[in-house]
Each structure stands twice: as structure tokens, then as C-alpha cells.
Amino acid sequence: MSHIKTITPIDGSVYYTFEQHSLPDIEKALKLARPAYLDWSNLALSERIKYVSDFVDAIEADKNEIAEEITWQMGRPLSQSPWEINGFVERARFMIDIAEDALSPHKPEAKDGFERWIENVPLGVIAVLSPWNYPFLTSVNAIVPALVAGNSVILKHSGQTPLVAERYLKAAKTAGLPEGVFQILHLNHANTAVLIADKAVDGVFFTGSVEAGVALQKSLNDKFIPCGLELGGKDPAYVRADADLDYAINNLVDGSFFNSGQSCCGIERIYVHENLYNKFVAGFADLTNKYVLGNPLDSATNIGPMVKTSAANYVRQQIEDAVKQGASAIINESLFKASEKGTPYLAPQVLIDVDHSMEVMTEESFGPVVGIMKVSDDKEAVRLMNDSKYGLTASIWTEDESKARELGRQVETGTLFMNRCDYLDPALAWTGVKNTGRGITLSTLGYQQVTHAKSFHLKIKK
């Protein structure tokens, strides 16, 4: 085994060292997972629910320790990290609570001489590949329903957040999950491709970049299995002329800069009606200037470093290129003392005088920058919102619900918000269109992704 080091963005030191699993480790995990799935799926749903509930409780019990580990691994302010475990618990318990209804057999109308029904049958062995930015919130969407439905799960987590995988494994042991039902593997890209291509894997859930999603699909070319892909985003917001200005500003600043902008459903571009534009920009800049960039372990910090210097440099380059093309950067970076080139500490930035010829308005930034454009009407706003190869979420800020419904049906997106953003409601399907990917997690529909339909057609002799 080779040793891998997780470098903390806080100070560039080595925070954790772990062993990377090898091809024999993959083979061993798969040999355990298949028989484990068969036994696990034969348990009563109520028994699986009890196990998984205890699994969730075990993670919640370590909430404070886990929050600090998250901060050290990926840089989110410690004042905000516990929120992730709260969200994890909310989603997990919701999916557990709806399991009985979601997994109950469907029976068509009675037909004389026949018994007919459709069951939701677990896929088998599921591989979950999760990223670092919301390490529990991205993984819980697949792990909990997969286990409840009767699948065995192998989790491969990001090398930036390996302790999240270790915490999951500890919780599985605490809950007494049978051997092989839940396993973790620390893998490089090549060995991840080997894992998912193996004939023993029956389904894959991946959250990450478009490029990685394309590579993953190629690894599955020789087999036909369900593959859920949550990929990139460039999520827009439209502030209509009738919007509550202060409310929209407060929520959109947070939606743009929470987690240093490293959110798949974070706000990356804003279109504002010309009647509100000047006041909106002024208020947005004023609130942004009140942010405190610094060491995420400090209680006063509400925006921490990006995960890596290379990620921060990518955003810096987007900003620089946009300014060269005529954009105006309206936030004085010198007000943020921790911001420094050559480090992952990057001040939040707001760009105006932008257009869609600039990469910052079309390519995913995944950092603390947002562009704001003036629009003259709803039609122009919808056109610009749809002028993207991504489609995860979009938000409309208005006091007119009927208009939000009308425009929302025109916007090409997986989730349409009115007067909120950057949030997952576990009762709703989490999905995307275009290059954002395919498949669904959460809601009752999420259970359809971790099962397949099996029809029973029995002719009864009288």
C-alpha cells in the first residue's frame, strides 16, 4: 500500500496520512459485498431501518469531533461545520421515514384469475464516489437509501476528506451492520475505474466534475448498470423588479459565498432588473465587505480558505480575465487581510459590467466570485439563465408567485426556487439537466434509483 497525505488548506501542513487501497483490497471488498447483500436484502425492512437509524445516530453522536475534522480537511469555518451534520441527519432521517411507503409494492387493479404486483428490488452492490466540498451531505443522499433498500455499499471518498469515510465506517461498526454491508476504500483514479468496471458492482453514484463524469462513463462501457451523476453547475438567480431588495441581497450574498463558493448549487451569476440594479449592486457589495476571511478555526471567521491554492488560482484567473475583457471588480481585496496570492485564502469578489463572452459567467467557478448583470425584462433574464451548459438549480426573487411558476417552467434546471437558494429539501428530487448530469437522489424518487422494478405475474388455477 502507498501512503497518501491530506494537506489542510488552513496552513498547508499535513493533517492526515492514510494508506491507499490496492487491487487485492478491491477484490476482497467485492467478495464480501456480494454475499452480504444477499443476506442483508433478505432482512425485513424494519430490521434494516433499525440498523441504519443506529448508523445515523452514531455519526450524530460524534458531531463536534467530526465538525472540527471537516474544517481541518477542507477549510470551512468551524462555526459552520456542525451545520453539515445537522443536514446529514435531516436528510437521513427523512429518507428512513419514507422508506416503507417508497418501497411498498405497487398493485394494479385486480384481474380475475391472476395475482399481479411490482416490487422494488435492490440493485445489489453499489459504489458511492463522493467529493470533499460537502463530504457528508453529498454521500448521505445515496448511502442511506441504498442501505435501507437492501443494497450493500462500498464508499470511495475524496482523498481530501478521508476521515469522513473513516467516520462512516466507525458508525457502521457501532451500529452493528453485518460484515460486508458497508465498506470503504481509499482509491486513486485508476483503481476507482477498476472498482466500478467490475462485474460485481451493480450501480454507481458519483458527485464531481463533468470531466470525471465522462471518464466514469467510459469505465462502464462494457456493462449496463444504473449510474447517477451529479456534475457541474453554474446556478443563476434572477431578481425581478418586484423583489424584496434587502431580503434578496442577504440571501444571495450568502448563497454566493457560503463555503467559499464551493457549492454545486451555490449562486454563480445574478441577473437583476434594471429598476433595482444600482441599489442591488450597492447593497450586495456593502454586505460582502462585511465578511471576515481568515483562519476557519477562529470564531469570527465566516469565510475560510478554498480547498487548495490551485483552486483559488483558477478563480483568480477567471477574475483577471474578466477584468481584461471589461468587467469591473467592485470589492477591494485589500480589505480582506488574509487574502494573499499563492495561498488558498481568496477574498470574495463581485463583478459587474460582465457578459456571457466571459468565462466567469459561463464556466463553473466553484469559488467566492459572482457576476451581476442588468436585464430589462423577464424574457431577457430567462434567456440568459438558460444560456448555460449546466442546469442544477435556479432561483427567482419576486413577490409574484404566479410569475415564479410561469418563468420557472421556462428555466432549464433541476430545481427551481422562489425567494431561496442553495438548499436541498429531502422531500424533493435532487437532479439536474444538461451537463449537470443524470439520475435522482432524495425524495421517494430517490429510492427508484437504488432499486429496480420486478414484476410478479401469477396465474391462479381454480
Image (cartoon, grey):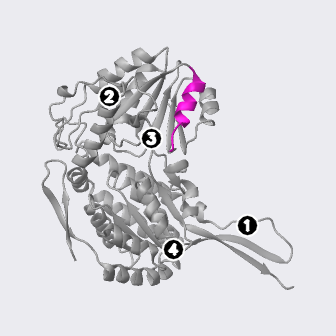
Q: Position of residue 39 (x, y in %)?
A: 48, 82
Asked if one can make out residue 388 in the rendered structure from this viewpoint, the answer is yes
Give the mark nearer the N terminus: 3 vs 2: 3
- Closest to the observer, 181 or 177: 181
Between disc 3 and disc 2, the foreground one is 2
- Cα gap from disc 4 to disc 1, whole angstroms: 26 Å
**In this view, the mark in front (1 or 3):** 3
Magenta segment: 377-389
Give the crowd class for mark 4: few <14, some 14-19, many >=20 residues within 10 Å. many
Which residue occupies the extreme front position in the image?
324
Give me the disc on residue 107.
Answer: 1
Give the image quarter of residue 178: bottom left
Number of on-image labels = 4
Residue drawn at (45%, 78%), measured in percent from left and top? 198
Q: Are marks 2 and 1 in contact (CB under 8 Å)?
A: no
> What residue is at 35 percent from the left and 17 percent from the top?
282
